Image (spheres, grey):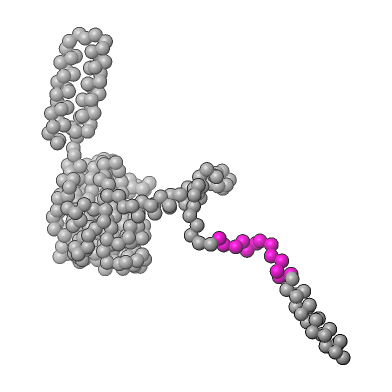
Amino acid sequence: MITHEIMTCWYLNQLCMAMRRVTVPWGAGFVLAVLSLLAERCRADGGGPNLAERVIWAVNAGGEGHTDLHGIHFKKDPLEGKVGKASDYGMRLPILRSSPEDQILYQTERYNEDTFGYEVPIREEGDYILVMKYAEVYFAQSQQKVFDVRLNGHVVVKDLDIFERVGHSTAHDEIVPFSIRKGKLSVQSEVSTFNSKLTVEFVKGYYDNPKVCALYVMKGTLEDVPKLQPHPGLEKREEEEEEEEDGEVGEEGGKKSASALPKHRVQSGPRTPNPYAADNSSLMFPILVAFGVFIPTLFCLCRL
């Protein structure tokens, strides 16, 4: 596929060069301009490095080496026998949102009873992306495994609860863009000195142990990162959360915008009574008590 695109680009370039050597009328000049644009597009799309070539470092945590569908080669875990424990407990489970060929990247993992991490050597400046792959294959509810992720001391993922995000045995990618320029690391509006070494740490929290299934670093932007397969249930929940967030966004002065509120909202239960609504039953109670006492008293007096 890549060879075909390169040959097409070469052919367009040669055609453009040939037409420039000849004096042509206006119509042919227009065609020449179109061919030039197509050639530039081909150089941008097909002539540049592919996804696998942009990846500078990739590891299958807790597992063996693996090459995924995009051509990214994940190395065997370099922490094997050094830090933490490897687990293949997820091998008995199918992982949703992941292709069958690449489920191994979510079925094995490395965890530790304390903070642990990986070091990634980076010698060139530019824009980079850190992609961390997760799947919760053990716990069946939230608040069982919660931890942070640090990048050279910067907290880039706070209170990660995999089950809370996507549920059980479901692939989840945490994507963190960062840049390196003039000896400085910039990530999430924070800047620090960079010494050619990127340290990715998984920080021990209050709930169980930190872990990671696989991770890689690539040159590029968010648009270059492959997307996971859609998850209907997850997408529906995200849409509902977006609607709630839109409804909470107010106009100037804190007033809510009527256009931002969802048009149809499903009630989760019976309408809650207004505690401030007018209720005269409390005023009638003393009268009823007095009336109930007066009638028997009057009856007894009449008998006398």
Q: What residue is at 27 percent from the left and 66 percent from the top?
A: 138
> Which quadrant would residue 96 be assigned to in this image?
bottom left
Identify the magenta region: 271-283
Q: What residue is at 18 percent from the left and 57 percent from the top?
A: 104
Magenta span main SS:
loop
Q: What residue is at 14 percent from the left and 36 percent from the top?
A: 1
Instruction: Please state if 259 lies on the left or on the right of 80 as rendered.
Output: right
Who is closer to the viewer here, 23 or 207?
Answer: 23
- Magenta stretch: residue 273 in it? yes
Residue 277 coordinates in the image, percent (x, y): 66, 61
> Which quadrant would residue 26 be assigned to in this image?
top left
Q: How many numbered marks have been drawn onto this rendered protein structure?
A: 0
Residue 206 coordinates in the image, percent (x, y): 35, 67
> Which quadrant would residue 41 be assigned to in this image?
top left
Residue 121 coordinates in the image, percent (x, y): 20, 49
Who is closer to the viewer here, 23 or 276?
Answer: 276
Residue 21 coordinates in the image, percent (x, y): 16, 12
Give the residue furthest to the front.
303
Say whether residue 105 is visible: no
